[in-house]
Image (cartoon, helix red, strand yellow):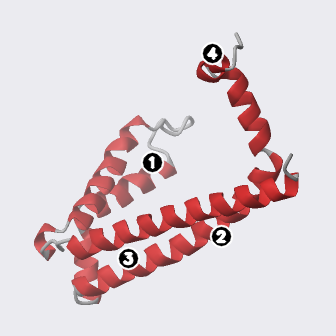
Amino acid sequence: MTDPETVYLELEGRLEQYITDGLQEWSAAGALALQRTQMPPEEDSILYWIIALAGNMVWAGTIFMKPNPVTNLPSTAQKALSVIGAGFGSDTARQVKNLVQSAPEPDRAKEFFAEIIDIRADQMEVSLVDGMAEFARMDFFDELSRWMKASPIYSREHGRS
């Protein structure tokens, strides 16, 4: 019979490799997607369309808010959301950006997202590997045992009902 510590170390090593391989594939897929991404022309920018849509939805959603129970007039929150939603819904974000600065270079946007992918991959690897080690030592064999007992395939192959 194999020493439990040896089994845990082997399991941890394999799980860590699966996590690392998966994150490397995720990072590579993100980098490839960024490389292939065509930046939209400013006038067709999906970002500003989404901001305007969200603003319009917030503004439209104020109709479902309850009025002030005392005055039966729109509540302060309803008034604020209505004004904010209408402001963003009228493409204010793009206009303010154009007033404050020139449009960012598309290559800089790709560099920014590439950096985010790298940072997130590193953070996820640390988090997943740390969590995996605890899972391997504390929960894996209990979960595997429960799965095997509940599995109709395992039960049939090993003469269990």
The foreground one among 158 and 36 is 158
N-terminal-most mark, 3 or 2: 3
* Residue type at the position of mark 1: Gln
Residue on which the image places disc 4 = 156
Looking at the rendered image, the disc whose residue lies closer to the viewer, 3 or 4, is 4
Residue 78 in the image: above or below residue 113 = above
Residue on which the image places disc 3 = 113
**Could you tell me which residue is drawn at 79 percent across and 55 percent down?**
8
Residue on which the image places disc 2 = 126
Secondary structure under tag 3 reads helix
Any part of residue 30 in sight = yes
Secondary structure under tag 2 reads helix
Q: Position of residue 43 (x, y in %)?
A: 11, 72
* Residue type at the position of mark 3: Phe
Q: Position of residue 83 (x, y in %)?
A: 36, 58
Near mark 2 (Cα within 10 A), the count class, few <14, some 14-19 or many ≥20, is some
